[in-house]
Amino acid sequence: MEIQQTSETKGPRINTQLLGIPKDEIRRIDVSEAEVVRRQYLSHIREPQVTIRPDGVQFNNSAIQMLEGAVYIYLMVDRKRKWLVIREVDKDARDAQRWCSVKDGARKPRKITGADFSERVYRLMGWNKGYYYKICGTPALPVEGEECLYLPFELENYDRYILTEKARKSAGVLDEEVGKEELDKIRAEAEAAKKAKEEAASNGTKSRRRKKHQHPESWEDDSFGEPYAQHKDRLQLPLLQKTDDGQLTMDLFDDTSERKRE
């Protein structure tokens, strides 16, 4: 049995032998308006993720493993698309960041401390410092140039979690930076979690209250995701610029580079 599949065809091959009917008799449907369910609504703990806090950034083990062998990376920010993009670089590359620890040949996540970096990201995104944010990444290749793997993280598609008072103090976040309204929400949630834990303890059980997270307000409560016709499963990366010393770089909060392009 021969099954034809063009370069544009996506997904598994059609096993007509298993279906028991010829391919031309299979019903055809239009799914252009069907919504592709966002992975943030489902378990995505094994997805490559970055966690951004007011005092730094950390990538999870899945992200570390996806860039096989990488110990140093570039952190790049595309402000127009609101992406954080990483790629492997040599240890001696200018602006290289070590994103993992290595012990006995095994790479493990490590926090990259950087309050100045986080301050700029929070300001770019309009985020509140009473929370930390987790974003999933999707592997991608550059539009042109060297063939290396990138991990873009779309910052607008986040899970948001409350920072405890202890964590806020550790990160140097002041109450006025969070704001009274958000502080009231955070404290109410913390009180509810504490009460649930105490009630569970009094009943001799463990609290089943899961860690509460929030999604962007632009996501409608009854929406599953983007319509299939608008959804893109692969990200196209912008062209990278070369600096005078030959290093590849991307606009990192630099207004002058945008004005030059215009």
Image (tube, rainbow, N blue to C red):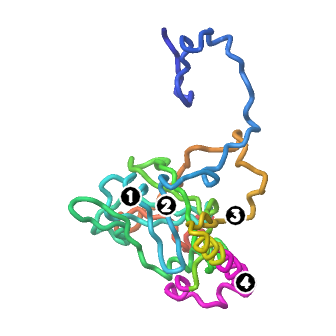
Image coordinates of residue 58 in percent, x first then y, are: 45, 69
Where the C terminus falls, by quadrant? bottom right
| Amino acid on which disc 4 is placed | Asp
Q: Secondary structure at mark 4?
A: helix
**Taking 243 as reference, is 234 above or below it?**
above
- How crowded pointer 3 is (Cα within 10 Å; few <14, some 14-19, many 20+) is rated as few
| Amino acid on which disc 2 is placed | Val
Residue placed under numbered mark 2 in the picture: 85
Which sits earlier in the primary sequence, circle 1 or circle 4? 1
**Taking 254 as reference, is 28 above or below it?**
above
Residue placed under numbered mark 3 in the picture: 216
Which sits earlier in the primary sequence, circle 2 or circle 1? 1
Report how many numbered discs are placed on residues in the image. 4
Rounded to the nearest whole Å, what is the CA distance between mark 4 and mark 2?
34 Å
Residue placed under numbered mark 1 in the picture: 64
Rounded to the nearest whole Å, what is the CA distance between mark 2 and mark 1?
14 Å
Q: Nearer the viewer, mark 3 or mark 4?
A: 4
Image coordinates of residue 24 in percent, x first then y, are: 66, 11
